[in-house]
Image (cartoon, rainbow, N blue to C red):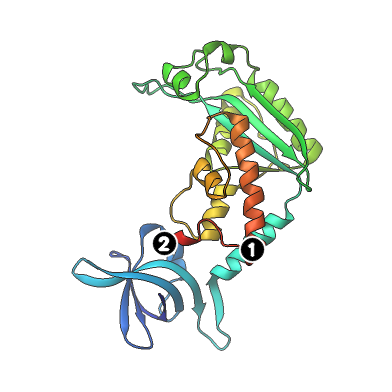
Amino acid sequence: MIHHGKIEHLDTRRRTLTLKTPRAKRAYYLQRAQFNRYLPLLAKGNYVVLDAGDIQRKHGLHRFKIRRIRRIVAPGRRPRDVFSQRRLREGVRRFINRIGTRLFLDFEMSMHPYHKQPDFTQEIIQAGYVLVDAADNVLEEHRTFIRPKKHPRITPRTKKFLDVGQADVDDGVSFETFYARLRGLVQEHAPAIVVWGRNDKLALQEAYTIHNLRPLGRGARFVNLLELHKNYFHLKNDLGLLKTYLAYGFQQDEQAHDALEDARMTRHIFTAFKRTINDPTRIGPFEQDV
C-alpha cells in the first residue's frame, strides 16, 4: 500500500516517523537498516512516498511498518528529490551498461580449527576467475590452489568444508605467483573486477599485508554485484550466491565451494541481472522482496 505525506516528527530512539497524510497523521516504523540509510534525509517538512505494510503495535504505539521508501522530496520554490528509487535504479542500469571487460573473481579461504584459535589467520588457498570481453566472450578461465604462508597445514574443518586435501594445497602456487598473474591481467585488460559481496576484496587486502605486497592500484576497479542487487531491488538482507543463481532460473544441486565454479556462477548472475534491468517487461526475481 502506497502512503505519502509530510514529515512532522522523527523519533530517533524508537525509529518512528510521523507523517501528515491527506487523511490524518500516521506513524511509521523504520527497521534499523532503513533508519541508518535514510536518517540524513528525514528532515521535518520533507515529503515522503513509501510502501507500508501492516500496522504493528510496539512501545505502546500503533505504527505501519515501512517496506520501502520510494521518494523523498525537499520543499522549496522548486521542490527537489533528495532520494528517488527510480533514479537509483536508473543509476544502477547506466553503471552496469558502461562496464566493458569483466574479470569475475572468487576466492576460497582456509578456515579456523573447530576450536577457534586467537592467533589463526584465514588465508586464500584457492582462486578462480573468468575473464570476458565487452561482448561477453570468454578470454580466459583459471583455477589454482595457493599455498598459505602463516598456516601451511590446513585444518580438518577446511578439508571437510571445501573437500580438499593437504596435497592439493601443497601443490599450489605461491600467492606472489598468483598476484603477478592477476596484476598482469589488470594492466593488460583494465577489467572491472566483479565479486559477490565484500569478502573477496577484503581477503585480497589481507593477503597484501601478509605477503608485503602493494595493492593492485588504481586500475583495479571492484564491482560488488551483491550490493548492486540490494540497491536495485531494495533488499535489506544479503543474498547468497547460490540462492541468487537459482532465482534467475539456472540449475545447480548445491554449491561446490570451488573458486572457478563460483566465478562462473557470478558471471551468469551478472548477465541475467543486466538482461533483467534493461527489459522493462521483465520482472526481477527479487521484486517480491522489496
| Left or right for 248, reference 193 | left
Q: Residue furthest left?
A: 60
Vertical comparison of 163 with 43: above or below: above
Q: Position of residue 20 (x, y in %)?
A: 36, 84
- Asked if residue 85 shows in the view, the reply is yes
Q: Quadrant of residue 68?
A: bottom left
| Left or right for 144, reference 56 | right
Q: As shown in the figure, which amino acid type bears the numbered disc 2?
A: Gln
Choose the circle earlier in sequence order: 2 or 1: 2
Q: Position of residue 187 (x, y in %)?
A: 78, 36
| Residue occupied by mark 1 | 91
- Asked if residue 290 shows in the view, the reply is no
Q: As shown in the figure, which amino acid type bears the numbered disc 1?
A: Gly
| Left or right for 98, reference 280 | right
| Residue occupied by mark 2 | 34
Q: Residues within 10 Å of mark 2 (few under 14, many from 20)?
A: some
Quarter holding the N terminus is bottom left
The answer to which of 277 and 147 lies nearer the viewer is 277
